[in-house]
Image (spheres, helix red, strand yellow):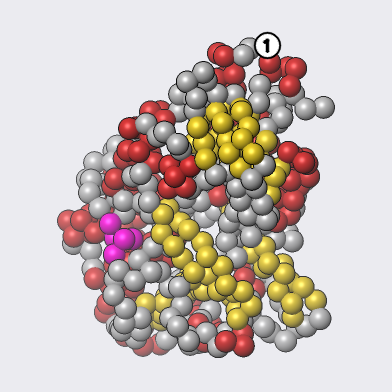
Amino acid sequence: MKIAVIGAGIAGLTAALELRRSFRPTVFEAEGRPGGHSNTIDARHGGRDWPVDTGFIVFNDRTYPGFVRLLAELGVASRPADMTFSVRHEPDRVEYNGHSLSHLLTWKRNALRPGFWRMARDIIRLGRDTTARLASGGDGLEGSLAEFLRRGRYSRELCDWYLAPMTSAIWSSSHAAALETPAIFFARFFANHGFFDMGERPLWRTVVGGSRAYVRAIAQRLGDDLRTGCPALRVERPAGGGVIVESPAGSEHFDAAVIASHSDQALGLLADPTDDERDVLGSIPYTDNLAILHTDTSLLPARPKAWAAWNARVGHDSPADPARVTYNLSILQGLAPPDGTQFLVTLNPKPGEIEPGRILRRINYHHPAFDRASVAAQARHARVSAGPTFYAGAYWRYGFHEDGHWSGARAALQVEAFARRHAPAARPQEAPA
């Protein structure tokens, strides 16, 4: 049985690796490299190259079980990561790092501001409230995050100084979009990732040598069946069955295909989308984000003690403007040039905000946007999973690397079940040597 996998991000690579146990899948990737958001760039500095991750950066031991198993299977090492978060709120002149009490009070004026203590109190209250509501089946978590906060009479400071910047940074969205996140979706994610835990929190890690280390290990196993620089241009499902994939290599017939691209891209590939595919895939949009790799520390908090792994910046912008966050890869990946240079990735900086001479690379990324319509569409996955096309991507859950891995593994299982129904004798014969 011939299987196609379209897209070589974490979802497509996982699907291909799992399917390779029984088949020999052909993987189509539009870019000249596999990996998708696993995009390690060599930053030249001080006479050597530093492997800087610009998309996927961190994972943890608690909520990334599939990805942890994948690294172990591939023999790829990881190291601890310092996951701290800072906020620089320019309109209210607030700056803090949430790592500890002393970091919270980096600006001594914070201790004298009643609003700062309202925020701290409400962070604890929000954790207790959402945890209790999740335990009772989600009662009271209906509607958006903004609606939930209003019903609970949470403070403006919690919203403006903590939740909006953090939620915006997590999902690379505007503050307005962040607050439209479904409350139940937000609560589950924060609970799963231990963001409200006052005690034992997940242990965060990064891949040694950059995320490309695991991508290269998978690519080596796939060999020539991984076609980079070879985009799928069109997917047809002829009446006689199977899938026809058109690419620069020509038109090829497959028995089934995993489409592991973004939801909007997947829909655009289909020559004949069903009503369900238009409804489900069309309900999960993506947003564009410009990421700039640079070394300009003016994008970090004013006080070095407030520097964190993730640094959100709230300016005098419209709430609809894209997220502004700077990831400090020197902290996250332990990259420490002797001269103290900080390797940074900033999302959506203002024009001219970064000193031009300190810019190392510009990258465009696309992230799923989660609102009530998209979360509801996730629950309709079964409607587009009958075959011979199957869909994988992080957009089917929370938009993170573990979600892409989980989705790719799910698609592989669906293909195997499809194969058993339609060609039970083909599986052992077509397994790779």
Query: What type of secondary structure mainly makes up the magenta span?
Result: helix
Q: Where residue 344 appears, x then y in whole percent?
A: 59, 75
Q: Residue at x 78, y 41 (%)?
A: 223
Please say whether residue 177 is one of the residues in the magenta stretch.
yes
Mark 1: amino acid: Ala
Residue placed under numbered mark 1 in the picture: 425
Most distant residue in the top direction? 425
Q: Where residue 110 appears, x then y in whole percent?
A: 36, 83
Q: Does the rendering let one see residue 33?
A: yes
Q: Where residue 275 appears, x then y in whole percent?
A: 33, 32
Please say whether residue 18 is one of the residues in the magenta stretch.
no
Q: Count every numbered label the image shows and give the total.
A: 1
The residue range painted magenta reads 176-180
Helix, strand or loop under label 1: loop
Quadrant of the image containing the N terminus: top right
In the rendered image of this protein, does residue 56 appear above or below residue 64? below
Q: Residue at x 39, y 63 (%)?
A: 173
Q: Where residue 335 appears, x then y in whole percent?
A: 70, 72
Q: Nearer the viewer, residue 174 or 144?
A: 174
Q: Nearer the viewer, residue 106 or 192?
A: 192
Q: Residue at x 64, y 60 (%)?
A: 39
In the rendered image of this protein, does residue 396 appear above or below residue 210? above
Q: Nearer the viewer, residue 422 or 393?
A: 422
Quadrant of the image containing the C terminus: top right
Q: Is residue 424 left or right of residue 157?
A: right
Q: Residue at x 32, y 78 (%)?
A: 317
